[in-house]
């Protein structure tokens, strides 16, 4: 499970790598459960209408699909399902709902509604963190691209509205099996299946956001091991390395 990831190091990365307007201020560098990060959604999708406070009109029959319109949305890490009865209950659940296993997207009660409603997103991140258990004591390890460029992870989002009007927008990272992955199969509990976030191909961002539900899982594939590297987190360091 990856319950920690790092947000993008520079505002211009959002524009250069994800073709969205750069945020006025960056989120916290280190994102752990219930911290506020940024996700990218398709503003043209019906599922995003309420999220963005827009109306949605179905295209006429036979008309081409609306082009994808990427927008950044602040969201809390760790899914708060729309059906929870209170904000406090949702925030407690969010601690354990940071990762959505691909096998649970259509069967698990926490993620099923969001997935079937097409509430998919891209999570821009500089790295994600896992524990290396091989030394015997957990060693926090950050996974980055070898070229230090940002990654776009596949995610699902939810919007919870309380009786008093409080709104919580949240997200979870989608994870896939990594048993056969040359790098990520080193991490996780011995004897258990290994997992990793589903990192999207840069050329597939729009297709992922706009895909039909029955086709969306086709984009959830292991990111090539040769394009990733692992670095132990320096003891006592809570912030990203200075070279960022």
Image (cartoon, rainbow, N blue to C red):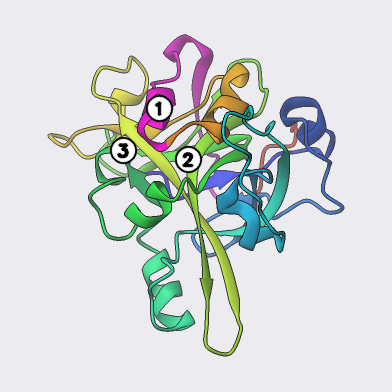
Position of 8 relative to 34 (above/below): above
From the image, state whether disc 1 or disc 2 is nearer to you.
1
Q: Position of residue 184 (x, y in %)?
A: 35, 25
SS for dot 2:
strand
Residue at screen point 44% across, 83% down? 86
Query: Which of the 4 image quarters holds residue 114?
Result: bottom left
Q: Quadrant of the N terminus?
A: top left
Circle 3 is placed at which residue position?
102
Nearer to me, 183 or 58: 58
What span is in magenta?
Answer: 213-238
**Observer able to see residue 140:** no
- In the picture provided, is 227 more to the left or to the right than 43? left
Query: Which of the 4 image quarters holds residue 216?
Result: top left
- In the picture provided, is 235 more to the left or to the right than 41? left
SS for dot 1:
loop
**Observer able to see residue 139:** yes
Nearer to me, 236 or 14: 14
Circle 2 is placed at which residue position?
129
Query: From mark 1 to mark 3, how far is it between C-alphas?
Result: 8 Å
């Amino acid at each position: 499970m990856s319950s920690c990831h790092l947000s993008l190091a520079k505002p211009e990365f959002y524009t250069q790598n994800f073709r969205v307007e750069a945020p006025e201020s960056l989120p916290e560098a280190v994102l752990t459960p219930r911290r506020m990060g940024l996700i990218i959604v398709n503003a043209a999708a019906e599922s995003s209408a309420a999220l963005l406070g827009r109306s949605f009109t179905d295209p006429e029959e036979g008309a081409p699909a609306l082009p994808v319109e990427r927008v950044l949305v602040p969201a809390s890490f760790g899914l708060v399902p729309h059906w929870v009865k209170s904000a406090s209950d949702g925030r407690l659940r969010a601690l354990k709902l940071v990762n959505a296993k691909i096998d649970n997207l259509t069967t698990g009660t926490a993620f099923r509604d969001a997935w079937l409603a097409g509430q998919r997103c891209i999570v821009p991140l500089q790295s994600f963190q896992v524990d290396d258990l091989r030394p015997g004591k957990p060693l926090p390890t950050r996974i980055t691209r070898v070229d230090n460029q940002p990654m776009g992870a596949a995610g699902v989002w939810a919007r919870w509205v309380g009786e008093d009007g409080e709104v919580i927008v949240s997200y979870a990272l989608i994870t896939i099996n990594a048993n056969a992955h040359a790098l990520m199969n080193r991490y996780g509990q011995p004897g258990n299946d290994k997992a990793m976030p589903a990192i999207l191909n840069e050329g597939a961002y729009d297709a992922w956001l706009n895909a039909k539900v029955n086709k969306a899982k086709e984009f959830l594939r292991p990111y090539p091991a040769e394009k990733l590297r692992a670095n132990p987190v320096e003891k006592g360091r809570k912030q990203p390395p200075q070279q960022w």
